[in-house]
Image (tube, rainbow, N blue to C red):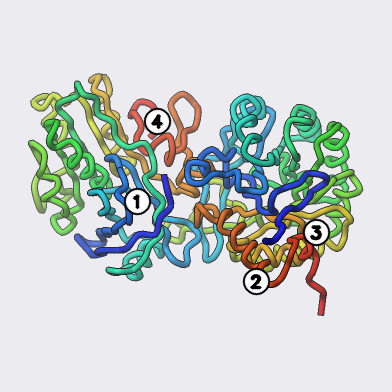
């Protein structure tokens, strides 16, 4: 039996599979389909200090092998999450609170509020679907470093993950910037900014005009970026982008990821995460891999 | 709520651009009128949310319009014997109280199909008055199912069959005679808007089933938001698809 346990900045996960932020709510709905305590952890829907109503609809479109979304950080606010969902979710699995803000100070406040209450905090500085904050802070390395430093200063116990945008000049430069700012881990990739046009109406499908592209079609780009980031920093990396099966997860781990997140595939197949966990165990057993951690960064360049 | 692999029993055209797909599940699954399923279409990342038209234990029928690549693939790829991934049953469904005896159903376009499930569910216990709108005679389907109630008025936009006009117009011509205790409606947004205006001030509980592009279908991703009149958002897939008409902005 393969040991699937991984440790991310001192936090042990029973396996490296985590549903990605925004595709899984706070876990309650999917828990009606399967027991989510099988998961390594859950990255929550992006939380902000105040409740947000998000963007107008349509918020989703499909392109071949990918989808685009522009939900716009709709969420009930961090206090509502703490009061109604956190205790339940912690009783199930590791909680990675994904947090966003409009300006640096918001990130400090929300990190301070969640410090010690959750297992890990994932700083969302890469959401392409909100007008201010979000990605604006995640593009330039100096901004990445600065917001990371401010968030880190607000945290006494909970380790900090910085979620990187792929819509940047150099992913390794931004990963290093997060590390300099004090990040304990980086996760990538968030979605790529894209557009789909309804040719009958001659208008973008999404009410927001642009949205974040995700799904199987982005996997090769994401693997390359995870490889680059993992080889640029000395902190652990969480890889994501188009993972649909256990073999995809292995690919990201071999590129240097300690854990992986699964997003769009939860829509295609509600049972995606448990299937990937089972598949990982099978793959490792079939390949004589005793510990999944033996695969981290196992891919060597030609 | 579960994800299953079902077997297609039949997938055929029943009217212009309209297909009816019946699948069998291994175990009987309880589906209420007005609930929907998410069908996985091979090669497409997003499932297709489609209202249930008939549910009889292990046999479930959904009807859909050929609208884009996904529904065309659904029509061409899934013939008898094929396996199809289904997430079900989803959404809240219609709800009619014990006291509400006279039920009016008002439908247009593909909106008639969830109403067929309501007619089937309530045909025995309630008096059903159905007003169903179609583009023209060639678009009419499911007439046998719609006739299970006490009254059926078919309306066509061009008058090629039945009442000439919309289903809302046909309903409003009969509302004072029928005196419905509750109205169930589904159809294009302009139709629902016309209904909202027509019944406002009459104090008849009116429920509409909404359509929206969806991500997960189970309430987690917040993609299928609809605006509520109180300024908040609701999830069409989980809080709906059925809402009280005064509750939602149309």
Point out the frontmost of discs 3 and 4: 3
Q: Position of residue A293 (x, y in %)?
A: 77, 60
Report the label total.
Answer: 4
Q: Are marks 3 and 1 in contact (CB under 8 Å)?
A: no
SS at circle 1:
strand
Which mark is nearer the camera, 3 or 2? Answer: 2
Q: Chain of mark 4?
A: B
Query: Which label sits on residue A171?
Result: 3
Residue drawn at (22%, 39%), measured in percent from left and top? Answer: B118
Going from the N terminus, do you reach mark 4 or mark 1 first? 1
Q: CA distance from mark 3 to mark 4?
A: 44 Å
Name of the residue lying farthest toward the front: A1
Residue A234: horizontal and vertical position, in percent? 89, 55
User: In the rendered image, which residue does mark 4 sit on?
Assistant: B248
Same chain for the residues at labels 4 and 1, yes or no?
yes
Q: Disc 2 versus disc 1: distance between alpha carbons? A: 40 Å
Discs 3, 4 touching: Cβ within 8 Å: no
In the image, A172: left or right of A3?
A: right
According to the picture, the residue beneath numbered tag 2 turns out to be A286
């Amino acid at each position: 039996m393969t040991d699937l346990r991984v440790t991310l900045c001192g936090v042990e996960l029973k396996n490296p599979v985590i549903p990605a932020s925004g595709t899984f709510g706070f876990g309650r709905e999917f828990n009606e389909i399967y027991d989510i305590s099988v998961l390594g952890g859950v990255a929550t829907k992006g939380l902000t200090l105040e409740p947000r109503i998000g963007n107008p609809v349509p918020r989703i479109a499909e392109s071949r092998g990918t989808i685009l979304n522009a939900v716009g950080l709709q969420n009930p606010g961090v206090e509502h999450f703490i009061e109604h969902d956190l205790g339940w979710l912690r009783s199930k699995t590791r909680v990675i609170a994904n947090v966003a803000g409009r300006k640096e100070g918001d990130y400090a406040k929300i990190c301070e509020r969640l410090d010690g209450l959750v297992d890990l905090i994932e700083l969302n500085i890469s959401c392409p679907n909100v007008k201010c904050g979000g990605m604006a802070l995640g593009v330039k390395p100096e901004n990445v470093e600065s917001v990371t430093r401010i968030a880190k200063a607000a945290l006494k116990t909970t380790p900090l993950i910085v979620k990187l945008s792929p819509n940047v000049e150099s992913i390794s430069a931004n990963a290093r910037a997060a590390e300099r700012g004090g990040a304990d881990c980086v996760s990538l990739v968030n979605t790529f900014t894209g557009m789909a046009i309804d040719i009958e109406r001659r208008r973008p499908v999404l009410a927001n005009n642009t949205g974040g592209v995700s799904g199987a079609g982005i996997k090769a780009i994401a693997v390359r970026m995870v490889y680059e980031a993992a080889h640029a920093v000395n902190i652990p990396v969480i890889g994501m982008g188009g993972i649909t099966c256990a073999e995809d997860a292995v690919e990201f781990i071999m590129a240097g990821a300690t854990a992986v997140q699964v997003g769009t595939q939860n829509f295609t197949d509600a049972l995606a995460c448990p299937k990937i966990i089972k598949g990982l165990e099978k793959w490792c057993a079939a390949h004589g891999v005793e510990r999944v951690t033996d695969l981290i960064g196992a891919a060597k360049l030609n | 709520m579960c994800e299953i692999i079902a077997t297609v029993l039949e997938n055929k055209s029943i009217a212009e651009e309209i297909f009816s797909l019946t699948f069998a599940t291994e175990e009987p699954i309880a589906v209420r009128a007005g609930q929907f399923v998410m069908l996985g279409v091979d090669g497409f990342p997003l499932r297709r949310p489609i209202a249930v038209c008939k549910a009889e234990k292990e046999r479930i029928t959904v009807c859909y319009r050929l609208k884009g690549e996904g529904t065309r693939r659904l029509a061409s790829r899934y013939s008898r014997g094929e396996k199809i991934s289904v997430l079900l049953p989803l959404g809240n469904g219609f709800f009619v109280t014990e006291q509400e005896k006279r039920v009016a159903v008002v439908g247009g376009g593909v909106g008639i199909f969830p109403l067929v499930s309501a007619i089937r569910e309530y045909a025995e216990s309630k008096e059903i008055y159905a007003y169903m709108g179609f583009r023209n005679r060639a678009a009419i389907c499911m007439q046998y199912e719609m006739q299970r109630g006490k009254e059926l008025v078919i309306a066509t936009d061009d008058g090629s069959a039945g009442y000439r006009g919309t289903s809302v117009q046909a309903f409003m011509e009969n509302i004072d005679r029928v005196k419905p205790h509750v109205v169930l409606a589904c159809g294009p947004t302009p139709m629902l808007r016309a209904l909202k205006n027509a019944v406002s001030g009459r104090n008849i509980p009116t429920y509409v089933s909404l359509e929206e592009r969806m991500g997960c279908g189970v309430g987690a991703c917040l993609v299928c938001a609809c605006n509520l009149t109180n300024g908040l958002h609701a999830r069409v897939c989980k809080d709906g698809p059925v809402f009280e008409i005064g509750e939602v902005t149309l």
